[in-house]
Amino acid sequence: MSKPVVGILTLYLNDRKALEERPIYEKMITAGARMGMKIFVYTPEDVAEDDQRIRALIYKPAAKRWTKRWVRPPEIIYDRCRYQKSRRFEQLLAYRKRNSHLTFLNRPLRNKWTVHRTLADVSALRSHLPETRLFQSPDDVKSLLKKFVTVYLKPINGTGGRGILRIDRQKDGTLLLQGRNHSRSIVQPRRISRSSLAIVLGAWDMHGDHYIVQQGLNIKLPNGRIHDYRMLVQKNGSGEWEVTGCAGRVGPLRSVTSNLHGGGAAVPMNNLLRQWIESEETINEIRTKAESFGVKVARHLESSYGALCELALDLAIDRKGRIWLIEVNPKPAREVFIRAGESEVYQKAILRPIEYALWVHRQQTSKAHSLQVSDDTPDNSGDPGNLTEPQEASPDGSQHTNLLGASE
């Protein structure tokens, strides 16, 4: 059987071609090499115009260094590209459109509003969703504030807590506004009258994005800090959805979010639950229900949008033990687990996409072999199922005989 070739598709952070997750890629490539896999990293900017050659980033575990080399396109693509408003993201969309015939382990997930509506179509999932609507005017915020003490205003494509505004209805009739700007900096709390809400919202920098208005949940700890839970659901080495782990996150003082990049701290899930729930039996029941819920969400989103291999679910659990889905992240980081002291979960989170890619490769190879046997003729058609060893590609498109390998 040929060795699977996996390309980790990502985006440069800036024009200096910095990569955000280089240490994670090093671990994945090293693990893949032990499993007999050939893995490299690339971006749409590294692809030649004919899409037949890639100036790939190659990590060599033995030497612990990176190099660049022209290679042929991978057979399997693990997309780690996060949404960003840039020409780089436009290049990604164009690349995926041109190469939709290739095997992508995961597809782009839609924005927060579309995902919410997709999940709300399923009665078993709907009861776990905070009331949410698309922001069209300040009246949408005022309407939800009549029903709930707290309301959040969120960009539908935002990540890392950027651009989020929290509005609390006070007993004296005023409104307390807190949030984070698009640089993740904490916006100082301010009280306003209800009559001035429209003016304040009009001045809020929405960064040219659409927003949703969402029911706020009571997730403040006794010390006044916001907390929630990050659950990672991934495909395993048998192609099945499984919860890899779930850790708690606690936001910094005066923060309206718990994101680690915004200064949040990570703790084991059970440690955090014990601040809400006294019974260990109840805690175990909550975890079991949360994990079952997480798998259901992943299965439904995959059936709606196409191939996925991992999702992060941001969950809230109220004092009654009710599980709420705050949002879904299709390109999850793993950092929360190492910060929570759960190194085994962290390692598993890194390995799972590689194990799943190997499973996909074996399924494709088995299918290609079955087709070849049924035709009773050699399969030299160039079908994507006919997997061959990758060859290094020269800039002019000619092929060299030496193979791309992590052990070189």
Image (spheres, rainbow, N blue to C red):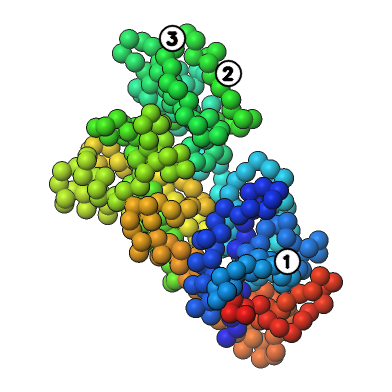
Asked if residue 140 is positioned above or below residue 291 in the image, the reply reads above
Q: Which residue is mark 3?
A: 193
Marks 2 and 3, how far apart in space?
A: 15 Å
Q: Which residue is mark 1?
A: 54
Quadrant (top left/top right/bottom left/bottom right) for the N terminus: bottom right
Marks 1 and 2, how far apart in space?
A: 45 Å
Can you give x and y, in whole percent of width and height, for residue 356 in the image? 49, 69
Say what amino acid the circle numbered 1 marks.
Answer: Ile
Asked if residue 264 is positioned above or below residue 395 in the image, the reply reads above
* Picture quadrant of residue 39: bottom right
Can you give x and y, in whole percent of width and height, for residue 249 in the image? 36, 44
Counting residues from the start of the chain, the first of labels 1 and 3 encountered is 1
Can you give x and y, in whole percent of width and height, for residue 237 in the image? 44, 71
Q: Which residue is mark 2?
A: 203
Asked if residue 152 is positioned above or below residue 313 in the image, the reply reads above
In the picture provided, is 360 more to the left or to the right than 172?
right
Say what amino acid the circle numbered 2 marks.
Answer: Ala
Q: Are marks 1 and 3 in contact (CB under 8 Å)?
A: no
Can you give x and y, in whole percent of width and height, for residue 19 in the image? 61, 54
- Circle 2 packing at 10 Å, graded few (<14), some (14-19), many (20+), is few
Say what amino acid the circle numbered 3 marks.
Answer: Ser
**Who is closer to the viewer here, 109 or 264?**
264
Q: Is residue 290 visible?
A: no
Say which residue appears at 62% left-offset and 60% top-offset.
9
| Residue farthest toward the right in the current orientation of the protein | 396
Asked if residue 288 is positioned above or below residue 385 in the image, the reply reads above
In the picture provided, is 154 more to the left or to the right than 97?
left
Counting residues from the start of the chain, the first of labels 1 and 2 encountered is 1
**Who is closer to the viewer here, 224 or 312?**
224
SS for callout 3: loop
In this view, the mark in front (1 or 3): 1
